[in-house]
Structure formats: structure tokens, C-alpha cells
Image: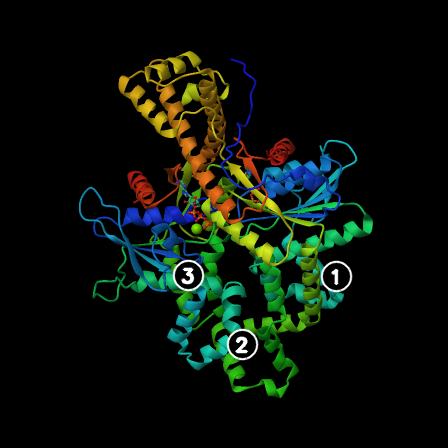
Amino acid sequence: MSRKRTRVGPLATPESTADPLDVDALLDDQNTRIIVCCGSGGVGKTTTSASLALRAAERGRKVVVLTIDPARRLAQAMGIEALENTPRPVEGVNGGPGSLDAMMLDMKRTFDEVVEGQASPEKAKQILENPFYVALSSSFAGTQEYMAMEKLGQLHRDAVETGDYDLIVVDTPPSRSALDFLDAPERLSSFLDGKFIRLLTAPARGPARLMTAGFSMMTNALTKILGATVLQDMQTFVAAFDTLFGGFRARAQKTYALLQAEGTAFLVVAAPEPDALREAEYFVERLTGEDMPLAGLVVNRASTAPAGSLDADEAMAAASRIDRTGAGDPEQTPGLTVALLRLHADRIRIVEREAVLRRRFAAAHPAVPTAVVPALSTDVHDLAGLRRVGELLAAQR
Amino acid sequence: MTGKGGTGKSTVAAALALALASRGRNVLLCEVEGRQGIAKMFDVDPLPYEERRIAAGLPGPAGRAGAVFALHIDAESALLEYLAMYYRLGRAGKALDRFGVIDFATTIAPGVRDVLLTGKVYEAARSGRKKGTSSKGGAQYDAIVLDAPPTGRITQFLNVNDELAGLAKAGPIKKQADTVMTLFRSPRTAVHLVTVLEEMPVQETSDGIGQLRSADLPVGGVVVNLVRPRDLTGDLLDAARRDELDRETITGQLKDAGVEVDDSLVDGLTAEARDHAERRALEDAQRELVQAMDVPTYELPRIAGGVDMGGLYDLAAALREQGMA
Ligand SMILES: Nc1ncnc2c1ncn2[C@@H]1O[C@H](COP(=O)(O)OP(=O)(O)OP(=O)(O)O)[C@@H](O)[C@H]1O
Ligand SMILES: Nc1ncnc2c1ncn2[C@@H]1O[C@H](COP(=O)(O)OP(=O)(O)O)[C@@H](O)[C@H]1O
Ligand SMILES: [Mg+2]
Ligand SMILES: [Mg+2]
């Protein structure tokens, strides 16, 4: 029984109205400079980014991929588990004119480096040691998104300067909502130069007009709730950070503009699940609203339709007939056929459910080109796996 | 109930609440991540910041079912309530809002959010008012199930009051923080972790258990969710993986069952079996890792058509059968 294997069966092509996404055209287009993979957590953003990067490199592009939080074994396979916060060449990429560098984002270190790059050494030291900064740089909701943007900006500047890269592929943090990636930088910078934090520094500078009744009521309340030390830490932090605010905001805006630029392509990654597809819809709408260049949707980990025309009900009916006649002789093949029929029915139900979900998306957003990537039967944790996902991404009909 | 994102925390929390709400017991299901997941699962209107009865529990073999109540906790309401309760901050509360402090505290300040959310859960455990009864005071829910933040944040979340107690050193805040920690560390609390049988979630679960233990937080069990059907076993599974299933038997049995058989059907079925067997091998390897974690484990099947209300009760029944409720 040595039949030639197709590892992955033919895809279910539901009567969706979406055009197939032409991944190779996107990768081969020299004008494509940045590809951003976004989507809600766990859908395969990191896998997709790394697969696209590898494929682009093996098709001749000089690529750097910025991954965030990759699975441990994948990071090992790419040689980036050391968290160096700078790109390093990936071994085992098939030769040719292209190349692949990869890195894993170290959020805290990126933040520290920005501070060090912008402030005088003493001031930087003062900031880095402030307890409030330590909390902010490691657990502020959105810091990871902000730092991903920051790192993208850095990579882009390097690419322009050195010519080492002609394509940057960016993974995004495992946020709950795909929108966080776009919103967080704005939130952080509006926090950093927001009304509240300005007010905290005001007493130090002492313009008496700010000491209104409302204001002292507020600081009193805060002291009562947070305690004087916390408030003081915040004040010291803000005072030290003061001169950096402008720089932060300017950098965030620059990177944001980069995302709207011609050479950028967004790919929204989703799993064929209601929540993930709903998030993808929000994201698509937002990108359109912000004039950000959407290249398409990737539906990852899709179930593949089984061959043959036996439907779920027929399969279950046949299974119970066999069960009843006892044809699954326990001595020989205990229920083998019954088990196969049940598996078949199960799979068809999943495929049908996914098809409905995808059709719903396509009906709402018919203009979004879509690539469907089947769920492999194993994890994707090495270059061979990435190559395989890359092939599947490109093989849309 | 914690777990890696998307593994089914909310679903399992809901199923556990249904399973616990038997024999006249009343259960409160809380959510703190502000997405109205409970309302969506139970197909009711978006929940207010107030306890609501949302479903009847899973009937037990004996006695009437209890009820499941739900509470959607958002940090902003919790903060305003807290300020009103402890500080009688009427006007000052407004001043805080005007200066952007409420926004700062609930969306940005690290930790504050978690203090508020855990504080409210504690309140519910202490004095949860049961709708439709006139009794007051004392713990009135027989159980509270919290759809908690994901594994990566759970220890920080539950432990935030410990840090707060350290910061405050003395006074009413320290006292409150200590009481909350005492409850969370007591045998009345159990932190369950949901996982699927894949490498990253299982790794995260194991790391999570370690972190919870070093913070003295009581680890409950691991709920393995989305388990694939296990009709194929042992030798047959191996044969399926090697593509060596007995085609003749299959063909014969299908014919006997009145199915129109051709080669492509048998090819299709054996190919599906091979994919399935490969996945199962991966799952089995991960299952061994889960079992080595030395905590009780429970398994829930992947429901092919998606989880509706009926599905939630089925999952609840499965949890009860395995002794989780
Ligand atoms: N046993 C199951 N069978 C089938 N589908 C399931 C099962 N458990 C969960 N799901 C589905 O998986 C998806 C994710 O589940 P759920 O929302 O409970 O996860 P979560 O861990 O709470 O996610 P998040 O981290 O986003 O809060 C939902 O669509 C849910 O219906
Ligand atoms: N098409 C696929 N088939 C099988 N496994 C996949 C596929 N895509 C992703 N995975 C696996 O799913 C897990 C999560 O993927 P990952 O890319 O890290 O998600 P994200 O970055 O969106 O959180 C990884 O273990 C990965 O190997
Ligand atoms: Mg990732
Ligand atoms: Mg949830």
C-alpha cells in the first residue's frame, strides 16, 4: 500500500466571492518593502510572518523578519532564541541572491535603548532605575505594540542606510485585539504627554494658577489612594522623562506614516473561528478607514475537505448500520470502518462550519483577496515547516 | 479559570458554572476582560455591572438544578464604586475624571486595574447578593467561577494584592489587600488551567503552574480542551499513520452498510485517518507532558459544529462525569 501521498488534501473552495491572494506576486514585487502580519492571538501570525520571510528570501529578496514571541522550537530553528534584539542570519536558507535575517523583539531592551539614545547618560540612568519606569516598560498595556513599531522604524532606517534589506516582514504582538497594534502607540504617547502626567509635574515647576481647588482635591485623593511614594515616583519619572516626550511622539508618528506608505502591505491573519474572523473584520475596516494598504486576508489552520462525496449524515448512518450488524468484529478490526466514518463526518461538519464563516466574511468584504492555509497535522517548528506553509500560502487557486 | 488565549477559558468557565449549579446550588460566573463573552455564549443582552441570573444549571441525577448568575466586571465601574464606597469621593471623584485620572488608572497604570478587578471578585465572594432572595450578608453563592486573564498574566493578576499590601505597609488598604490575598491563597480558591494538546499552550501551562506555586496560589486542575475523537486506537492508529489500513475490510464493511464504494472513497477515508493519526501522535506526546504535571486533569471533546447552549451543557456534563463538579 505505498500510494503516493498528498500530505494535504484539496481545499474546500466554498462559493466565496473573494479573489485568491497572489502571495508570490506580492513577495516578488520590488516595491513591497514592508509586510505587516496582524490578527488576534494564536491564529498563526508568527508562523505566517516567518513563512513569508523565508519564501521571499528563497525567491531572491533580502529579507529581515521581526518576530514577537515565537514558539520556543521555532525560535531555536531560526537561531534567534537568544533575545539579542538585533537581526542575525538564519542558517539553512536555500541559496541564491536572497538572504534571510531574523530577530525576536525584546520589549524592555528596546525601550531602554530608546531612552539611552535620547537622554544624557545620567538622565538615562535616573530614568532606567525609576520604579515607575520599570513597571511601565515591562507591563504597561501596549508597550509591546509600541516597541514593535519602534523596532520596525529602526529596521527601516537601517535598511535605507545600509541597503542590507529590501524587505521587512513584521509580526505583531499576541494581543487580544488586532487593533491594539495600531492603537497602542497612540495611547502610550498620549499618556506620556497627557494632561494628567503634565499635571503631576506642575507642582514642581510651580505655576500657581494650576493649583486650583479641583487639582488639589485630585492630588489629595491620589495620595490617599496610591500613597505618597507612588505619586512621588511618578513625579520624578515624569520630570526626568519630560524632554523625551517630544521625541517619542515624533517617532511614533513617523512609523505610523511608514505604515501608510506605498511600499507597505498589511496581511490580516485569522483562524476560521468566529472571534478571530470578527477581529479580522474590525481590522480590515480600520485599515480601510486609515488608508492603510491592505494586501489580503490569510485564513490559517483551515480544515481540509475530504475527498469523495459521502456527506456527514450518510457517513453517520452507515456507521450506525455497521455498529448494529456487528460487522466491526472486535477480534480483527474493532470498529475500524465505524471509526473512519465518524472521523469523516466530524471533519465534514468542521469544514462546513468554517466554510460558512468564511463566506460570511467574504460577503461583507468581497474585495479582500484571501489565502486559505490548511492546518498541517503537525506543528510548524522548523524551516521545512515554514517552507511548507509558504508553499501553501502561495498555492491559492 | 485561566489558560492560553483562545484555548477555551471562557467556554470551560461557563461549562463549569453550569456543572456546579446543581442540587439547588447557585453559582456566579464572572468575567473581567470586558468583551461580553458571557452574554454572547449564553445568548443574552450585554451584561451590566450587576449580577444577573442567566441560566439554569445542569440538572443533577437527584434534586433540582440551581441557577447560574453572571457578573461583568469592568475596571472603570469598579473604580467609581470603590471610590464612592471607601472614600466617599463624590466631587473629588469627578475631579479625578476631569484630569484623566480614571482613564489613567483603569487603562494604563500597571496594577491598578487588577486591584480593582480582584477587589470586586472578592466582594462578590464575600457578600454576593442572590437575586430573588431576601437574605443578606454571608457568602451566598455556593461557588464563583472567574473567567480570568490568560496564563501569562494570571499570577501577576491574583498576586497584585500582595504587592499592594507591601506598598501600603499599613492602614485600610493594606488590611483589605491582606484579606483578599488570604482568600486567594486559601483552599477555597482553585486556579484551573485550560490548555489544548499543542506545544505552546502545554508549555505555557507548565510554566504557569510553576509561577502560581511559587506565589503560593492554589493550583486546581488542568482542563484539556478541544480533544479530537479517539475512536481509532492502538495498532489501528499506527497502521493509519503508516497508511497500512486494511482496505479490503473497509471496502467490505462499507458495502455491507449499503455505501456506494469506489477507490477514491477508500483513499479519502484512509488519508483522513492518516492526518488524524499524525495529529493524535502529537496530542499523545503533549498529553503525557500534561499528565506529568501532577495535577488532576479533565478532558473535553472538540465539538465539531461549534459550541452553542446545548454544547455548553454537554461540556458541563462531561466535567461533572469526570468529577470536576
Ligand atoms: N470543546 C470545544 N469544542 C468546540 N469548540 C470550542 C470548544 N471549546 C472552545 N471552543 C471554541 O473555541 C473558541 C475560543 O473559545 P473561548 O472564547 O472560550 O476561548 P478563550 O480562551 O476564552 O479565548 P480568549 O483568550 O480570547 O478569551 C470559541 O469559538 C469557542 O466556541
Ligand atoms: N497552518 C498551520 N498548521 C499547523 N500548525 C500551525 C499552523 N499555523 C500555526 N500553527 C501552529 O500554531 C501555533 C501558534 O502559531 P503562532 O504563529 O505562534 O501564532 P501567533 O503568532 O498568531 O500567536 C504554533 O505552534 C504553530 O506551529
Ligand atoms: Mg506570535
Ligand atoms: Mg475568553
Circles 2 and 1 on the same subunit: no
Residue under the image location 58 percent in, 35 percent down: A380
Circles 1 and 3 on the same subunit: no
Task: Using the numbered discs, state the Cα–Cα distance from disc 2 to disc 1 in whole angstroms.
Answer: 31 Å
Q: Amino acid at mark 1?
A: Gly
Number of the label disc, if any, that sits on residue B99: 2
The C terminus of chain A lies in quadrant: top right
- Residue A167's place in the image compared with A196, above or below, is above
Pick the front one: B11 or A257: A257
Mark 3: few/some/many CA within 10 Å (<14, 14-19, 20+)? many
Chain where mark 2 sits? B
- Residue B227's place in the image compared with A86, above or below, is above
Number of the label disc, if any, that sits on residue A395: none
SS class, disc 1: helix
Pick the front one: B122 or A179: A179
Task: Using the numbered discs, state the Cα–Cα distance from disc 3 to disc 2 in whole angstroms.
Answer: 25 Å
The residue at which mark 3 appears reads as B118
- Residue A260's place in the image compared with B164, above or below, is above
Q: Amino acid at mark 2?
A: Phe
Q: Amino acid at mark 3?
A: Thr
Residue at the limit of the structure toward the left, as seen here: B63
Chain where mark 3 sits? B
Closer to viewer: mark 2 or mark 1: 2
